[in-house]
Image (cartoon, rainbow, N blue to C red):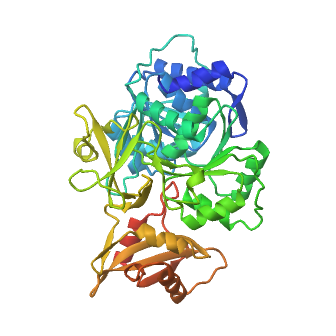
């Protein structure tokens, strides 16, 4: 099965049901499928063929969803890029994947033009809104493509073809394009919708950028099961989003830790106000146990799914909600049709309680990094059987006696102090449990005695005042002495990625430069 069939089959099953609510439009599955067909025809008539890469450089809007399915229906490979990406990085991505086309919007036209001045492969630029000149490629308006005749059949290819290239954030160097086939995407989406028990009755509200695979899969999975997707641009105005959630009687809400922190700051949110909300999901970074407990108080009838994943395979583990109270620090077990295990430095499986690298087997594991054999060889290595490669995640985990997994930290995040290894995440979880702590990052700073000393960098909730001594006493009550930070710094906010994940490495660099 190919990914665009999600939409086509839901259009047959639920033609008049609302598929998408975005930008003031309510679009049925029949309409969404028809517009994607026309968009595909428009791409094909302008020279986009099977295997071509189409970059989708847009905010969360209905046109982005049409562009994604339209590119797939044309047999192309789509690559979603965050709309906040600057021209130099956009140009790098366009050049790296040798994109044939870019789909964007009028507000971003200047960035598109600047990026295209440094590229040579892009032949077509499609803009939602008024067409803008000055772009070094054929330019067409989005509406022009939606007026195309879609009666001529297009052969898009088969399910082993690439469906998408998702570029990693590039925090450790140039961005890498993660190659995912239709088989990869279908396997991941099917596994996730299985344990979430998604059906056509679900109404999912997504504020996450669809350039982020967690947000992107909300689009794909809703189309797969015939659910309604409410697409919001962001969570900048929490009260407005929650009001929309109430009005639309939303059943599913994917979040990341920064969204959870914003929800927990709301003063007038009453427990039980969203009885229709069937589930909350979290990934990108683990929720601190204290936040999980408070979310469950606010949403007592909602199932909270703690999950772990990475772009290279989409999702790895999930924790059944009934296990949250017993294992609040766990991210669960392998998702359906997946195997997850922990290995030592030699690749040998280790037993319960031993920290090692998490390895993933499954049909959703990427095919590699686009034209980067060295990085691919580091991540994809021989598995238990001769015919396969498995994914070495680069993340350190431990497993309990029942096989539940616990994130310890990135291999390169571990701080060695006083001869002991410390996971910043473990200290950060304790800091988050302290009332008033909104954001936390723990890093290592040079120390003439300890080698490296722990420093906690904190952002507090509005109106909250804490002293360094109060923070240190709190940590001393909950951590072994070698894990207690030696220094505390307070800031208005911490640097974050476009998806809301705190950039601990950037905090480290800022301290080194100070």
Of all residues shown, which one is farthest toward the front? Answer: 401
Q: Is residue 363 left or right of residue 6?
A: left
Q: Nearer the viewer, residue 161 or 38?
A: 161
Q: How many marks?
A: 0
Residue 198 lies in quadrant: top right
Residue 421 lies in quadrant: bottom left
Up-down relation of residue 217 to residue 464 (above or below):
above
In the rendered view of the protein, which quadrant contains the C terminus?
Answer: bottom left
Residue 337 lies in quadrant: top left
Up-down relation of residue 376 to residue 142 (above or below):
below
Up-down relation of residue 426 to residue 231 (above or below):
below
**Can you give x and y, in whole percent of width and height, for residue 77 in the image?**
42, 30
**Can you give x and y, in whole percent of width and height, for residue 222 in the image?**
61, 34
Up-down relation of residue 47 to residue 197 (above or below):
above
Residue at 57%, 72% (x, y): give it: 433
Q: Is residue 200 left or right of residue 429?
A: right
**Can you give x and y, in whole percent of width and height, for residue 298 in the image?**
71, 60
Q: Nearer the viewer, residue 258 or 177?
A: 258
Q: Is residue 119 visible?
A: no
**Can you give x and y, in whole percent of width and height, for residue 362 in the image?**
38, 37
Q: Is residue 105 left or right of residue 365?
A: right
Q: Is residue 508 visible?
A: yes
Residue at 41%, 56% (x, y): give it: 401
Residue at 45%, 52% (x, y): give it: 86
Of all residues shown, which one is farthest toward the top? Answer: 152
């Amino acid at each position: 099965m190919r990914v665009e069939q999600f939409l086509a089959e839901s259009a047959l099953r639920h033609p008049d049901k609302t598929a998408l609510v975005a930008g003031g439009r309510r679009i049925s599955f029949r309409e969404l499928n028809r517009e994607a067909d026309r968009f595909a025809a428009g791409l094909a008539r302008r020279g986009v063929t099977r295997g071509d890469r189409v970059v989708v450089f847009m905010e969360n809007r209905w046109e982005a969803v049409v562009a994604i399915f339209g590119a797939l229906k044309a047999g192309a490979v789509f690559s979603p890029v965050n709309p906040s990406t600057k021209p130099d990085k956009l140009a790098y991505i366009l050049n790296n994947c040798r994109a044939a086309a870019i789909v964007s919007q009028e507000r971003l036209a200047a960035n598109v033009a600047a990026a295209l001045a440094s590229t040579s492969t892009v032949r077509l630029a499609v803009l939602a809104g008024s067409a803008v000149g000055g772009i070094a490629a054929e330019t067409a308006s989005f509406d022009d493509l939606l007026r195309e005749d879609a009666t001529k059949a297009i052969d898009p290819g088969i399910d082993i073809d690439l469906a998408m290239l998702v570029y990693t954030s590039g925090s450790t160097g140039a961005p890498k394009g993660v190659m995912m086939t239709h088989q990869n995407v279908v396997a991941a989406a099917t596994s996730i919708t299985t344990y979430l028990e998604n059906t056509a009755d679900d109404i999912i509200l997504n504020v996450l950028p669809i350039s982020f695979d967690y947000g992107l899969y909300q689009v794909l999975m809703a189309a797969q099961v015939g659910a309604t997707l409410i697409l919001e641009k962001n969570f900048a105005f929490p009260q407005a989003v929650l009001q929309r959630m109430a009005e639309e009687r939303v059943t599913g809400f994917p979040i990341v830790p920064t969204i959870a922190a914003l929800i927990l700051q709301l003063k007038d949110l009453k427990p039980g106000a969203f009885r229709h909300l069937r589930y909350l999901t979290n990934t990108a970074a683990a929720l601190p146990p204290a936040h999980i407990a408070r979310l469950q108080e606010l949403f007592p009838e909602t199932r909270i799914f703690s999950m772990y994943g990475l772009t290279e395979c989409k999702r790895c583990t999930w924790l059944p909600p009934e296990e949250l109270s017993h294992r609040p620090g766990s991210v669960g077990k392998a998702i359906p049709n997946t195997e997850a295990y922990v290995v030592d430095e030699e690749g040998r499986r280790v037993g319960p309680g031993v920290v090692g690298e998490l390895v993933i087997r499954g049909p959703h594991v990427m095919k590699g990094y686009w034209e980067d054999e060295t990085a691919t060889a580091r991540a994809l290595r021989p598995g238990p059987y001769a015919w396969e490669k498995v994914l070495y995640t680069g993340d350190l985990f431990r497993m309990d006696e029942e096989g539940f997994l616990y994130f310890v930290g990135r291999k390169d995040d571990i701080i060695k102090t006083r001869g002991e290894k410390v996971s910043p995440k473990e200290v950060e979880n304790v800091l988050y449990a302290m009332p008033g702590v909104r954001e936390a990052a723990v890093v290592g700073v040079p120390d003439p005695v300890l080698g490296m000393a722990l420093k906690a960098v904190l952002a507090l909730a509005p109106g909250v005042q804490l002293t360094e001594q109060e923070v240190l006493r709190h940590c001393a009550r909950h951590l072994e002495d070698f894990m207690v930070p030696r220094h505390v710094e307070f800031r208005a906010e911490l640097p974050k990625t476009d998806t809301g994940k705190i950039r601990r490495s950037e905090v480290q660099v800022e301290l080194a430069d100070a």
